[in-house]
Amino acid sequence: MRDIKLGRHVIGKNHKPFLIAEMSGNHNQSIDRALAIVKAAADAGAHAIKLQTYTADTMTIKGAYQIDDKNSLWNGKELHDLYKLAYTPWEWHQQIFNYANELGMIAFSSPFDATSVDFLESLNVPLYKVASFENTDHPLLKKIAKTKKPVIMSTGVSTLADMYESVAVLRDNGCEQLVLLKCTSTYPSTPENTNLMTIPVLQEIFSDCIIGLSDHTMGVGAAIASVALGARVIEKHFTLRRADGGVDSAFSMEPEEFKLLVTESERAFQSLGTVSLDVLPAERNSLKFKRSVYVAKSIRAGEQFTEDNLRVIRPGDGLPPKFFEKVLGKIANRDYAAGTPLTWDTL
């Protein structure tokens, strides 16, 4: 597994999670709103902003399909019309990318056909994202891989066999740095169908890849949990306010939530540490607060140690409690004042 360096950011097993704010269609066809989303993402601490590069005509054709799913956010929408509503005008890309870079973020996109790869190459994007629905489009994967740039690929709606094939296509065509994102392609996803336990399995199978999570659940719980299981890239859809509406707004994160994700995902990563089965150096001072054997009442030389004149109390300056019963009934060879810790040196 190789670390991926992107400007001042590093993606890798031993680095804090790389957090991507996905704009998608939440700009609602306003360049001013798009730029406001970029600013809000930067202010929230996102490391990258991601767009989607397509047109309705590069995605489908008029009349090809109408969504008929009562559980879908887009039920009743004609697919071509939906993509016309959601697409990010290509003439906006350069301005959005420049602004994101000025704010210290990485800016990149998901291309959906060969022409969008060519366009993004003209903008010199630093990496590419392959969306779940495109992860078996081998011609597209070859086109992306031949740029020799890092690739992040979502694994939604794909079998393990699909993943093997797609990874092989990318590798065989020049992709050396690859991130695979566990993804459930439902919008929104539920915690129950997120199946984060897949993450360490993906890491075992694709040991030369970095593993992450493309998260469509609400809130930060799933994303934080994914860090403990090995995710080092987290992608969440991002908007200014869900109440503003938009094609993806219902399952998108607001700035305050994303800021929480930034803080808590880093804390989760830091808390992993290393395997420790001993007292930590940081705990040394706390040893004082463990219990030990103390003289509770004054004892004269020649008297017995009893449950009446000895107690197991804090602090830990005396014998460990496991020796309490062993000293009961023994004869004191000196005087002991109340409050004295019983130690081997004094016995």
Image (tube, rainbow, N blue to C red):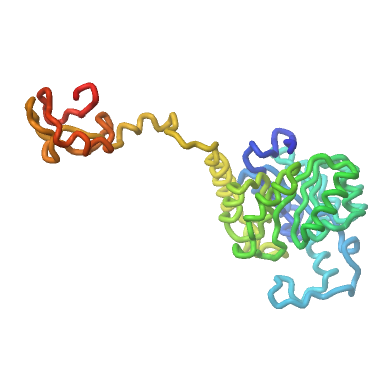
Residue in the image at 58% along x and 46% along y: 265
Q: Give the camera-side residue of 239 and 70.
A: 70
Task: Tell me the quadrant of the picture where the N terminus can be found.
Answer: top right
Residue 21, percent from left and from top: 68, 50
At a point 64% along the width and 37% down the height, the residue shown is 15
Q: Vertical placement of 56 versus 233: above or below?
A: below
Which residue is at the front of the view, 230 or 333?
333
| 284 sits left or right of 58 in the view | left
Q: Position of residue 75 (x, y in %)?
A: 74, 75
Whether residue 99 appears in this view of the structure is no
Q: In which quarter of the image is residue 151?
A: top right
How many numbered marks are there? Answer: 0
Q: At x 60% / y 62%, what residue is drawn?
A: 191
- Horizontal side, residue 260 vs residue 145: left or right: left
In x, y percent, where is residue 124?
Answer: 85, 40
Q: Where is residue 23 in the image (x, y as percent from the top left)?
A: 72, 54
In this picture, is 75 found above or below 198? below
Q: Residue at x 66, y 52 (%)?
A: 199
The residue nearer to you, when weighing 212 against 48, is: 212
Q: Nearer the viewer, residue 123 or 207?
A: 207
- The C terminus, quarter of image: top left
Which image quarter: residue 25? bottom right
